[in-house]
Image (spheres, helix red, strand yellow):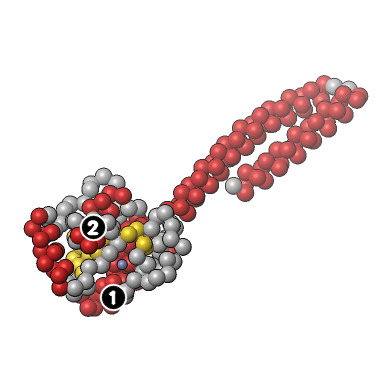
Amino acid sequence: MGNAQAIRRGRPRGLGLSLLLALVAIAVPATAPAPAAAAVDLEAATRIAKGVFPSVAQRCGLVRIEIGLLSALNASASAESYFYSCRVRIAPGTMTTASNAQMCSLMVHEWGHLAGLEHSSDPDNFMHERVPHNRLCGPSDEEARARQVLEANRALRREAIADKLSELRSALRATHRARRRAHGAKRVRLARRAKRLERRMKRLGVELRSL
Ligand SMILES: [Zn+2]
């Protein structure tokens, strides 16, 4: 399925494009430095893409990766690939907005083009125009966020249980002290209370170990 994190991309073709690209290259430097802060891990993304398509290295040798404006045809895309000159150009905006998972999915897609693959009409296919999350790139952004939320909730629950256990331990000590001093029905009642407290502590201990 197409999803919110899909990335648009394009692929220029044909002779007219070389002219167009030449014009773009004059107006805009072909490469620009990647943003320094919180930069997406382009190297890791490229490494995975290379691993998926070893045939690209055989055909191209080195693939040139540029960060710069895309050709007019792909103005709204995230990246574009040039099959014959073995280049991938990434839009500057993609460098600042894409997550590592998205960049990796995008690079595998572009490498697919360099390997000769065309777009797929299946929105779940990694060669779809709106690049879906690629399983080879690890957890998707949604999955990573869901894991973070789950882990945060677990941490909160662990804290709450630890608090409760301290409270119950104090109550149990107080109950034992009172029971030792008490007689008759009161002593029995306090003994029952101590048992209840112990059972609760045991249940919480089991839950804590499962978190
Ligand atoms: Zn494509």
For residue 19, what is the image quadrant? Answer: bottom left
Q: Is residue 124 left or right of residue 73?
A: right
Q: Give how far across and how far down residue 37 sits, in percent.
A: 26, 45
Residue 48 drawn above or below residue 199: below
Determine the CA span between mark 2 and mark 1.
Answer: 23 Å
Regarding mark 2 in the picture, which secondary structure is present there?
A: loop
Regarding mark 1 in the picture, which secondary structure is present there?
A: loop
Q: Give how far across and how far down residue 24 sits, in percent.
A: 13, 59
Count how many numbered circles sit on residues in the image: 2
Find out whether the residues at labels 2 and 1 contact each other: C-beta distance under 8 Å: no
Q: Please state which amino acid type lies under the numbered disc 1.
A: Ala
The residue shown at (50%, 45%) is: 149
Disc 2 Cβ-to-ligand 1 distance below 8 Å? no
Q: Is residue 21 left or right of residue 180?
A: left
Q: Is residue 61 visible?
A: no
The residue shown at (25%, 67%) is: 11
Q: Which residue is mark 2?
A: 75
Front residue (pair 170, 53): 53
Q: Closer to the camera: disc 2 or disc 1?
A: 2
Q: Which residue is mark 1?
A: 115
Q: Please state which amino acid type lies under the numbered disc 2.
A: Ala
For residue 175, what is the image quadrant? Answer: top right
Q: Is residue 166 left or right of residue 41?
A: right
**Alpha-carbon neighbours of circle 1 within 10 Å: few (<14), some, or many (≥20)?**
some
Q: Give how far across and how far down residue 12 sits, in percent.
A: 22, 68
The residue shown at (31%, 75%) is: 117
The residue shown at (19%, 56%) is: 69
Q: Is residue 102 left or right of residue 193?
A: left
